[in-house]
């Protein structure tokens, strides 16, 4: 099976139980592992996740992330050799990174562009992410997490794989534009999870 790199937003959601994507991240990680995929942590993405958690810990008055627990988890990943060191490739790939950011008209940041460059070279395989900007990159293999549950592999351009979580039990994909709609959908997901037959 494939190696799947966890994007920073998935790492944040896994480590921060109050994150809006926490359940989706846990479900995705469990599903990928059950299917035999190897989950990969990359140094610069772990540090990006740490930066996000630090910012949230400093800014959120209610339910801030447990920074100590997150750092303990990250330290164990590094100590146990579970993190792949690819950030040093920035120097060699600097020109490609800048070209990718330019080509995306700023939709991809430097870390995202580095992921694209690394995938082009075969240094990484597929990316598990909540970032929909990767959908706009042709020939980029990503597991874009749009909906929980209902995971199905689908072919994309040039025969490349993408794990798509966009359909739940035949319901059409739609955008949630308001906070009220997001809360209603979150409640719906909980109901579906508790009553899988519905």
Image (cartoon, helix red, strand yellow):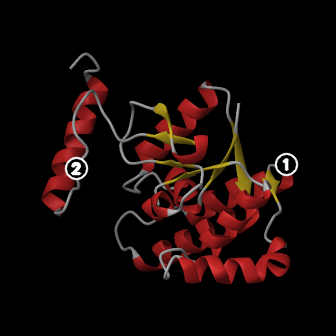
In this rendering, position of residue 169 left or right of residue 21 = left
Front in this rendered view, residue 147 or 187: 147
Residue 160 shows up from this direction: no
Judge the density around disc 2: few (<14), some (14-19), many (≥20) Cα neighbours within 10 Å.
Answer: few
Front in this rendered view, residue 108 or 189: 108
What separation in Å lies between label 2 and label 1 (alpha carbons)?
Answer: 41 Å
Rendering quarter of residue 110: bottom right
Residue 172, position as x, y percentages in the image: 22, 39
Sequence order check, earlier mark of 2 and 1: 1
Task: Give the residue displayed 59% in from the left and 74% down from the top.
Answer: 51
Task: Give the residue displayed 44% in from the left and 49% down from the top.
Answer: 22
* The C terminus, quarter of image: top left
Q: Which mark is residue 80?
A: 1
| Residue occupied by mark 2 | 174
Residue 40, position as x, y percentages in the image: 72, 48
Front in this rendered view, residue 88 or 171: 171
Of discs 2 and 1, which sits in the foreground? Answer: 2
In this rendering, position of residue 55 left or right of residue 175 = right
Rendering quarter of residue 188: top left
Please identify the residue farthest to the top as the structure is shown. Answer: 197
Instruction: State whether residue 78 is above or below residue 59.
Output: above
In this rendering, the count of numbered labels is 2
Please identify the residue farthest to the front as the structure is shown. Answer: 158
Front in this rendered view, residue 48 or 152: 152
Task: Give the residue displayed 58% in from the left and 80% down from the top.
Answer: 101
Residue 87, position as x, y percentages in the image: 79, 70
Residue 137 shows up from this direction: yes
């Amino acid at each position: 099976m494939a190696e799947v790199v966890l994007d920073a937003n998935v790492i944040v959601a896994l480590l921060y139980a109050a994150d809006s994507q926490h359940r989706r991240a846990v479900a995705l990680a469990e599903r990928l592992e059950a299917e035999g995929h190897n989950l990969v942590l990359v140094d610069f993405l772990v540090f990006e996740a740490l930066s996000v958690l630090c910012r949230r810990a400093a800014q959120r008055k209610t339910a801030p992330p447990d920074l100590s627990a997150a750092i303990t988890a990250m330290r164990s990943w590094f100590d146990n050799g579970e993190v792949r060191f690819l950030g040093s490739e920035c120097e060699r790939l600097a020109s490609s990174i800048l070209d990718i950011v330019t080509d995306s008209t700023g939709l991809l940041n430097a870390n995202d562009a580095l992921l694209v460059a690394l995938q082009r070279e075969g240094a990484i395989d597929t990316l598990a992410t909540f970032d929909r900007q990767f959908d706009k990159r042709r020939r980029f293999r990503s597991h874009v997490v749009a909906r929980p549950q209902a995971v199905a592999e689908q072919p994309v351009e040039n025969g490349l794989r993408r794990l798509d979580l966009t359909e739940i039990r035949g319901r059409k994909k739609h955008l949630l534009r308001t906070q009220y709609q997001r809360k209603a959908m979150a409640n719906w997901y909980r109901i579906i999870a508790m009553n899988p037959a519905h």
